[in-house]
Image (cartoon, helix red, strand yellow):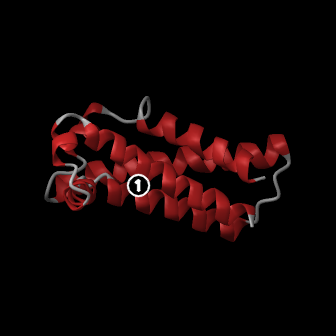
């Protein structure tokens, strides 16, 4: 069940992060102040909705045995971790800590960002599969 959940949540992530993210969200989700938080939380909300639909589709189409509370907790984890990572400072701080400043200046932050998101999805899928 883990592999199925992971694939469903990963596809949901790709849909929410790329075609589901507006230019405004992408540009402003890490900004300070209310406008930045609105953009960030709107983008995280897209992840919540698309991931929720993916889990519902898995339950209906594939007969996955998902209880409401664990599924809700997984969705909150995905949404919250996505919002946190997308503030951008956690990725920048990690890259400084890991001595990756050169890579950060050459496009590496996007890869570290995605690694964080995929790790959070993996944790959610593992938790739901147990």
Residue at (51% x, 64% y) in the render: 77
Up-down relation of residue 63 to residue 21 (above or below): below
Residue 13 point in image, percent of width and height? 51, 42
Furthest residue toward top: 19
Q: Is the C terminus in the top left, top right, bottom left or bottom right quadrant?
A: bottom right
Task: Identify the residue under disc 1.
Answer: 82
Q: Where is residue 70 shown, x and y percent of the image?
A: 67, 68
Q: Would residue 75 appear left or right of 22 to someone viewing this image? A: right
- At horizontal 58% and vertical 55% (from top left) the residue drawn is 122
Q: Eyeballing the image, is 82 above or below 77?
A: above
Instruction: Please name the residue shown 43% across and 34% down the image.
Output: 20
How many numbered marks does the figure carry?
1
Q: Secondary structure at mark 1?
A: helix
Q: Position of residue 47 (x, y in %)?
A: 48, 47
- Name the foreground residue: 47 vs 92: 92
Residue at 31% across, 51% down: 86
| Label 1: how many Cα within 10 Å (few below 14, some 14–19, many 20+) | many
Quadrant in which residue 24 is drawn: top left
Looking at the rendering, which quadrant does residue 127 occupy? bottom right
Q: Viewed as shown, does residue 66 lie left or right of 30?
A: right
Relative image position of residue 22 (x, y in whole percent): 33, 33
- Residue most extreme to the front: 99
Please tell me whether residue 130 is drawn above or below residue 82 in the rendered image: below
């Amino acid at each position: 069940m883990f592999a199925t959940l992971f694939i469903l949540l990963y596809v949901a992530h790709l849909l929410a992060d790329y075609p589901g993210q507006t230019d405004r969200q992408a540009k402003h989700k890490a900004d300070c102040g209310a406008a930045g938080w609105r953009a960030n939380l709107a983008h995280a909300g897209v992840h919540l909705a698309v991931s929720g639909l993916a889990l519902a589709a898995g339950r209906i189409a594939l007969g996955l045995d998902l209880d409401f509370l664990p599924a809700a907790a997984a969705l909150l984890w995905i949404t919250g971790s996505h919002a946190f990572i997308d503030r951008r400072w956690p990725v920048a701080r990690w890259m400084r800590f890991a001595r990756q400043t050169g890579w950060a200046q050459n496009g590496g932050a996007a890869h570290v960002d995605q690694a964080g998101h995929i790790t959070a999805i993996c944790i959610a899928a593992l938790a739901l599969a147990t």
